[in-house]
Amino acid sequence: MCIGSGYTYSISDWDILCIREKGILFKEAKFIETLASADTVIFDKTGTVTDGYLKVIGSPDIDSRYVDILYSLTSSSNHPVSLAVKRYLEENYPNLKLLELDGITQIDGKGMEARYGSMSLLGGSDRLLQSRGLTFNSSGRYTNYIFAVDDEVIGSFNLEDGIRDGCKGVDLSNPGRGINLEVIKAYRED
């Protein structure tokens, strides 16, 4: 990184060296000074700090009678949360069957609904359930996918995004130096 000679900034030479070694480039030196005086840094977590590849964590409990139905519902979507649940099912349940669902509808920012025979299916966020008058106590730490049949929650999944290689070892909970760090998750609105 070249910022010119004869500069006097409150950010130290050591900080500049560490920034350069991390592969961070600034178009102009004034951005470094602005960063040095910042008290809050906001990241769009997806793709900036994380690798954008959601994974189901833990061992969700789901009634085996509904696994093929859930698999069929998640197979009907290209949303990253649905795809992560679908991958989890493929990795953990052998011999999955793709069933024909009716009335598949995407509900922007919430999830999807469909029908299988006489069953009404919902799959998505807690906001989707709330919009239908249902309640579910989801974890605020994780992205959640909740599966309901006929207004009864059948299973829920906690998902987490992996940290990008260049960001591993970074403690996002306490950046230090009096800086407040805010991380925005694109997968849910809080």
Image: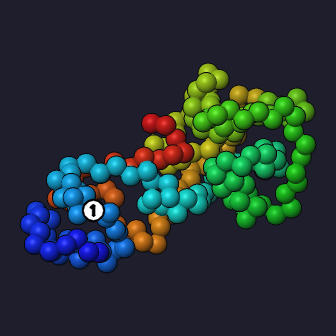
Relative to residue 67, is residue 27 drawn left or right? left
Quarter of the view holding residue 169: bottom left
Closer to the camera, 44 or 17?
Answer: 17
For the point 46% across and 72% down, the residue is 165
Q: How many marks?
A: 1
Which amino acid does the dot numbered 1 rest on?
Glu
Where residue 113 appears, as percent x and y from the top left, is 75, 33
Pointer 1: residues within 10 angstroms few (<14), some, or many (20+)?
few
Residue named by callout 1: 28
User: Which image quadrant: the N terminus?
Assistant: bottom left
Where residue 83 appears, as percent x and y from the top left, is 69, 53
For the point 72% across and 49% down, the residue is 78
Tag 1 secondary structure: loop
Relative to residue 48, is residue 169 drawn left or right? left
Where residue 161 appears, as percent x and y from the top left, is 52, 58
User: Which image quadrant: the C terminus?
Assistant: top left
Q: Is residue 153 visible?
A: no
Relative to residue 85, is residue 38 drawn left or right? left
Is residue 33 placed above or below 126 in the rendered structure?
below
Closer to the camera, 164 or 15?
Answer: 15
For the point 67% across and 48% down, the residue is 79
Q: Is residue 77 visible?
A: yes
Is residue 124 placed above or below 131 in the rendered structure?
below
For the point 47% across and 47% down, the residue is 185
Relative to residue 30, is residue 124 drawn left or right? right
Is residue 142 placed above or below 10 in the rendered structure?
above
Where residue 162 appears, as percent x and y from the top left, is 51, 63
Q: How is the image coloured?
A: rainbow
Is residue 118 placed above or below 43 in the rendered structure?
above
Quarter of the view holding residue 104: top right
Closer to the camera, 69 or 100?
Answer: 100
